[in-house]
Amino acid sequence: AAAFDSALSLNPNYAPAYVGQARLAFTKGDVSGALALTEKAIAQLPAFPAAHHHKGTILLAQRQPDAALVAYRRALQSAPDYLPAQIAVASLLLNLGKLDEAKVELAALRKAAPKHLHTLQLTALLAYVEKNYETAREAVQQALQISPDFLPALGLSGAVEMELGAYR
């Protein structure tokens, strides 16, 4: 917190410091304060993708998925290759059941970061939802090779194996 305050004392328009303060506020449960600081960052630097991404995270926590999606997409308008926003959009669309849109976003994510943990996890999740369990197994196993303790992949792996009859 002190580092962000120091940065802002030197440059009161330094958007990354506002986002840093917003992240700290958010982790402490001050959602409205986090949103206000994020909006301040966006006002200072409208094309700052991290600020729009963080705004999306806050809005999602407030159970506003449509508004979160808009914020994530604004991050991508500023920086089309901004991986955190690409992951967030694909994940949110999958969770909302918008599979056709999710497939488009996931294809872009696979192109940008084919071996990224979240790319593999989301690929596995989409395959699972579509009942393509062999593809889901392959992708989730790749994810677990990268991070053996990644809880979403562990849970999905168990569900896939149940569907494939491994536990009968």
Image (cartoon, helix red, strand yellow):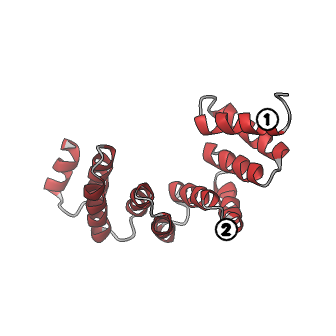
Residue depth check, mark 2 versus mark 1: number of the one nearer the observer: 1
Q: Label 2, label 1: how many angstroms apart (C-alpha)? A: 28 Å
Q: Position of residue 76 (x, y in %)?
A: 51, 67
Q: Residue at x 59, y 55 (%)?
A: 91
Lower position in the chain sequence, tag 2 or tag 1? 2
Q: In the shown orientation, is residue 163 left or right of residue 24?
A: right
Quadrant in which the N terminus appears: top left
**Residue 101 disc label:** 2
Q: Amino acid at mark 1?
A: Met
Q: In the shown orientation, is residue 71 left or right of residue 17?
A: right
**Residue 119 disc label:** none
Tell me the crowding category of disc 2: few under 14, some 14 to 19, or many 20 or more residues within 10 angstroms, Cα based: few
Q: In the shown orientation, is residue 131 left or right of residue 74?
A: right
Quadrant in which the C terminus appears: top right
Of residues 33 and 143, the one nearer the viewer is 33
Give the structural element (helix, strand or loop) at label 2: helix
Question: Which residue has dot 1 on it?
Answer: 162
